[in-house]
Amino acid sequence: MDRARRLPSAFEAALAEGRWRRAGPPLSPCATRRAPGPAPTHHAPYIPLPGYVQRVSISAFRNPLTGGWPERFRIRSVRASGNQRVVKSVVELRDITKSFGGVSALKGVSFEVRAGEVHALLGENGAGKSTLIRIIAGSHVPDQGEIRVEGELVRFSSPRDARRRGIATVYQELLLFPDLTVAENIFLGNAPRTRLGALDWAATRARARALLDALDSPDLDVDAKVGGLSVANRQRVEIAKALSQDPRVLIMDEPTASLAQADVERLMAVVRRLRERGVAVIYVSHRMQEIFDLADRVTVLRDGAYIGTRTIGEVTEDVLISMMVGRSIDQLFPKSDAPRGRTLLEVKNLSFRRAFRDVSLSVRQGEILGLAGLVGAGRTEVALTLFGINPATSGEILVDGKTVTISSPRRARDLGIAYIPEDRGQQGLIRSQTIRENLSLPILDHLSRASFVELAMEAKHAREAIERFGIRARGPEMMVRQLSGGNQQKVVLAKWLGAEPRILIMDEPTRGIDVGAKAEIHALMSKLAGQGLAIVMISSELPEVLGMSDRVLVMNRGRVVAAFDRAEATPDAVGSAMTRAGPGEDAA
Amino acid sequence: MDTLVATGGVARRPSRLSRIVDAYGQELVVSAAVLVLMAVAGAVNRRFLSQTNLTSLFSGNAYVAVAAIGMSMVIISGNIDVSVGSLIGVLATIAGTLAVKGYPIWLAWLFPVLVGVLVDAFIGALVAYARIPAIVVTLGFLSILKGGLISATQGAWIGNLPPAFFIAQFRLFGIPSPICFATVLTVLAALWMRYSALGRAIYAVGGNSDAARAVGIRTRPMVVFIFALNGFFAGIAAILFGTQLQVIQSTVPPNLELNVITASVIGGVSILGGTGTVVGSSLAAVLFAVISSSLIFLNVSAYWLRAVLGLMILATVLADMARRRRIG
Amino acid sequence: MRISLRSLLRHETVLGVLSVIALAVLARQSDRFFTTDNILNQGRLVSELGLVALTMTFVIVTGGIDLSVGSILGLVAILIGVFWKAGLPLPLAVILAVGLGGVAGLVNGLIITRFRVPPLIATLATLALYRGLAEGISQSRSVRGYPEYFYVLGQGEVGGMPTQLWLLLAGMVVAAVILGRTTFGRATYAVGANETAARFSGVAVDRTKLLIYTASGLVAGLSGAILVSRVTTTRSDMGMGLELDAITAVVLGGTSIFGGRGTVAGTVLGLVLIQALRNGLALAGVKGDGTIVVIGLVLILAILVTNIFGRDGDG
C-alpha cells in the first residue's frame, strides 16, 4: 500500500492556480489512527493530480458542510490509476432517451456537471427535468444512452446504487417518515452502528445534531417527530438527510418552492458552501432570480430535448425564457383595467381557530385582489373558510351586502363563491374520471331533475366547456389523468365557472404550469374580471401578484399585515411586509 | 391536506422525562390500567390476587402476547391480519396430530411453526406482489383455514397426547414456560425492532412506503418477511395454546384474532401504521387477560367479554385519532 | 364513464362467462340443479346475503368497507326476540329492531366521518361490539315460537316467488338506479375516486357516507328479520361470516376494493355465482365448512384477476 508522503510540486502549482480544490486534509504519514465510530461505507474524496488520478480511501466521518475532519482518522488505501485523462465531469450523461408507455420523456439528452459547480436545470413542465434527475438518481433506467460517474460507465439499477456512488437527491415531495424522529429520518438506511452491529442511537442523535447545526438550524430538535414540523423544517431535515451521505453530487428539485425568504437565503448559503467543498450541485428551479444568484451554468430542456447549456455570466433571462419556450414572451401579465362595480365580498374580523385571526378584506366587481405572503401565512386557510371547508369560528362574511354563514362548499357555491385549489391533482380534479364527470360534479343538481342526472344536458355542457376554454382533449370522455398540467387547470377553471360564480378565489393559479399556459390563464383572469367577477388571487410568486392585482393584501402568521394599492405595491414594499409582525406580535 | 398549519419547528428542547413520556406514553397508560384493574378486582374479590389465579391468568394468556408480537409488526408495517386466529387453530391441530401419530416431540413443536411461516409468507406475497389489500387476503384465509380445519377434523378433540408434549405446562426456574416464552420473545423482538436496521425498516415501510423505497428498502420482500415473522409468532403461540390442556380442540379459538389485534392497537400500535412497540402490545395482552379474569371475579357474565373488547378498541382508536389531529 | 365501462364490461363478460360455465357444470353434476323449485329456493336463500351485498356495493364504491354487517344482523335478530318477549306486538318489535340496525349503521358512519377513524378499524371494532351486545343481551339463549304470520316473510310466497326474493329484486332495481343514474350515485363514485376533490367540488361527502353506512346497517337488520322468519328462531351467532360473503360478491362483481368503480349489475352477477357455487357444493355433498373455504378462495382469486385485468384503468 502506497502512501503519498508529500504532494508533488506540480500539484501544488495546480492548487495555487485554483484549478483543483482540496477535498480533504493534507495526507500525513502519521495518519493511521482509527476514527471513532464505525467504518463508513462512503466513497472516497479524491484529490486530482495532473497526469493521473489518485484515489484515497479515508475512514472517518467528515462533516460535509464544514469539511471538518474528526481529529483522528485512518487512511485505508491509496491507489494510482495510471495515466488517464483528468476527469473533469463528476457525472456525465450522453444521448439519454427514455419513454414511459409509449410517451417520450427524453430524446437524446446530454448533460454533465462538474465538481464544485452549481448547474441549474431549467425547463417548462413536461420538459423532462424530473425524468432526467430521476435517471441520475437511479430511480429510472434510461432506454438508451450512457451515464458516467467520474468517467466510469455505470448502470444504476436502483436509487441505492446511485447513492453508493455519492449521488444524493432532495425531491420536491419530501420523502420523510412522519412518525419517526428527525435524527432517525436523517440517517435511516445508513445509520451509525455500534461495535456489535446494533444501531447506535447516541451517535445518530449526535451526528444529526451536528449536521443540523451546520445547516444553521439549531432550533430543530433531533427528537421531534417529523410529522409535526412545518414544511420548511421538513425540508431542512430532507437536506440534512441528503448531506448525511456525504455526497459528491447533490440534486435539488425545486427546493425553494415552499420556502420563506429567510429560508431561501439560508438554503442558498448552504448550496454555496457545498460548492466550495467541491460538491456538484444540480439545481432544478424555475425561479430565475435564484438561478442567476446561485448557478454557474444552466442547461435548458424543452419537450424532452436538450436545447443548450450556457454559463450564467453570458446569458440573460429573456434568452433563457426563449430557449425554454421556443419563442419570446413579452406580455406575461396582461392585466387590463376593468370597470369596478359594487363590493361583492366583504370580510370583517374573520378567524378560524389558530390558523388566522382578525382578517378583514373586501373585493369589488371587476377587481383582482392579490393575497401575498409566505407559505404558511394563512392565506389558503382564509380561502378554505370562505369556501366553507373550515367554517369560521368568529367574524362576519358579507356577500353582496348580506351577512351569510358559509358552512359547506355547497353553500359557498350557492352564494356564488368558487375556489380553484392549490393542489390541482388532489383537490381540484378526480383524475380517474372523465372530463365530463369532473365538469359536472359541482353543478350536478342543476344538471338533473328529481335527482336523476340528465345525460344529454350533461354531455352538452361538457362539449361547450371544452370548446369555450380551449381544452385540448380528444373528447369529453377522455380521462383527466391523461391531460397536460395546463389543460387540467383549464378543466378545474371550466368546472367552477360552470357554476356561474360571482366571486372567484384562485389559489396559486399558475403553479407548475408552463409559461405558455400561464399567459393564457392570466388572460382568462383579466377577461373574467372584465365580465364583472370579483377575484381573489393567492400567489407566492411576487411578479404575478404585482402584475395581476389591483390591490394587494399581505398576510403573515395568520394576520393581515399590510395593504397596498396597485401603485404602492413595489417588490420591496410587499416583500418586506411579508415578514412584518401582526398587531401585538413579534416580527417573524 | 393541511388545513391547520403547524407552527414551525420546536423552539425549546423538551426535557428527558417528557421525551420518555411522549415516546412511551401508551405503554405507561396500559401498565397503569393493568395495575388499577388488578387492584379493583382484588378489592372486590380477594381470590383474584391469589397466586394460583394470577399464575394461571398470565400463563394461560401468554400465547396472546406472543401472537401480538407478530401482529404488531404487521400493523406497524401498514397491513393487518384477521386470519391469525384460524391459523393458530390449524397449527395447534397439526401439532397435536403429529404428537399423537408418534412423531418426535420436537418435530410436533417445530413443524407447525414452519407451516405458519410458510402460510403467512404466502399471504405476504399476495399482499406485496399481487397487490391485494391485506384485509381481503386475510379475510379470505380466515375462511379457508377455518373451513379447512373443521372439514378436515370435524371438530374432533385430540387426546392421548404424550406427556412430554405439553410444553405450556412445564416450568423453567419455577415460572410457567408460557410466561418465559412471552417475556423473552417480547424483549428480543423489542430490541430487534429498536436496534437493528431491519427492525427499523418495518417502521419505514409502514410510515411512508415511497420514502422507504427511496432509501433503498425493498418494500415488497419486506412485507413478505414481516408476514412470515407473523406466522412464526403465530406458530409459537399455537404451540403454547395447544399444550395448555390435556386435549386439543380442533376448533378456532373464538375472539382470538380480535384479542390479538386489540392487544396491538391498545398497546400503542397505530392502525395507520408506522408507529408502536411490541412491549406495548404484550402489556395490552396482559391487560386483556386481567380484564377477562376480572369479569369473572366481578360476577359479570362472560358473554359480555366481546362487547368489552369492541368498546376498548373503539375507545383507543378514537383517542389515537384525536391525538393525531392535535399534532396535525 | 364509458372508458371504465369498457374495462368493466371486460370484467363482467368474464364474469358472465364464468357464471354460465359454473351453472352448466353444476347442472351436469346434479339433475336437481336446474329445476324451478331449486332456483326459487336458492333465490330465497340468497336474499339475505343479496340485500346486504347491495348496500355493501355502495360502501365499497366509496372506498370504505363494512365488516360489521354480520354482527348487526345478529344483533337485530336478538333484539326482535327481546322486544317481542318483552310484550311488544311483533310487527312493532321487528320495525324497532330493524330501526336499531339502522342506528348501528349510523354509529359506524359517525365514527368514520366525525372521528375520521378508517372504516376498516371502525367496523372491525363494531363487529366485536355489536356481536358482543348480541351475545351479552341474549346470554346465548335463543327465542322461539313466533306467530305463524311472521313466517310469511321468510318462508312464504307471493305470486309464486318467495317473499324475500321480491324484496331482493326490488332492492336490486332501486340500488342500480340510485347508483347509476342519480346525483347520489355520482356523489358515491366521486367520494370513492377522490374524496378530497369531491369535497372541494361541493359534494356532501360526510352526509353521503353517513347515509350509506346507515343504509348498510338498516338493510343488515332487515336481512336479520328475514332470517329469523326463515329459520323460526333467533340465535346470537346469526350472520357470522356474512361480511365475507358480501364483500366477495361485490368484489367478484368487478367493484374495485379501492373505491371509485363498480356496478350493481356486477354485484348481482357475483351473487349469482356465489350462490350457484354454494348450491352446487351442497348438492355434491360438501358441508357448510367446505363451502367457506371455496368462498375464501374465490374472494382472493377475484381480486387477483381484477388486478391483472384492471391495471390499465386503475387510478
Image (tube, coloured by chain):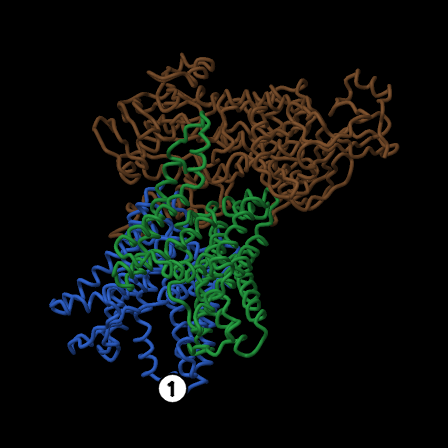
Chain colours: A brown, B green, C blue
Which percent across, then down, holds residue A95? 72, 39
> Which residue position is annotated with label 1?
C32
Q: Say which residue appears at 79% left-offset and 16% top-offset.
A: A17
Give the structural element (helix, strand or loop) at label 1.
loop
Q: Is residue B307 left or right of residue A48?
A: left
Which percent across, then down, holds residue A231? 47, 31
Q: Chain of mark 1?
A: C
Above or below: residue A119 compared with residue A492: above
Q: Is residue C154 visible?
A: yes
Residue found at the very far right of the displayed protein: A83
Q: Nearer the viewer, residue C191 or A46?
A: A46
The image quarter in which residue A576 lies: top left
Which percent across, then down, holds residue C178? 30, 58
Q: Is residue C304 visible?
A: no
Q: Is residue A483 left or right of residue A526?
A: right
- All told, the count of numbered labels is 1
Q: Say which residue appears at 41% left-offset and 87% top-offset.
A: C31
Q: Nearer the viewer, residue A2 or B106?
A: B106
Above or below: residue C268 compared with residue A405: below
Amino acid at dot 1: Arg
Q: Nearer the viewer, residue A393 or C51?
A: A393
Which percent across, then down, holds residue B238? 48, 65
Q: Quadrant of the N terminus of chain A?
A: top right
Q: Quadrant of the C terminus of chain A?
A: top left
Q: Is residue A392 left or right of residue A197?
A: left
> Mark 1 Cα within 10 Å, few/some/many (few <14, many 20+)?
some
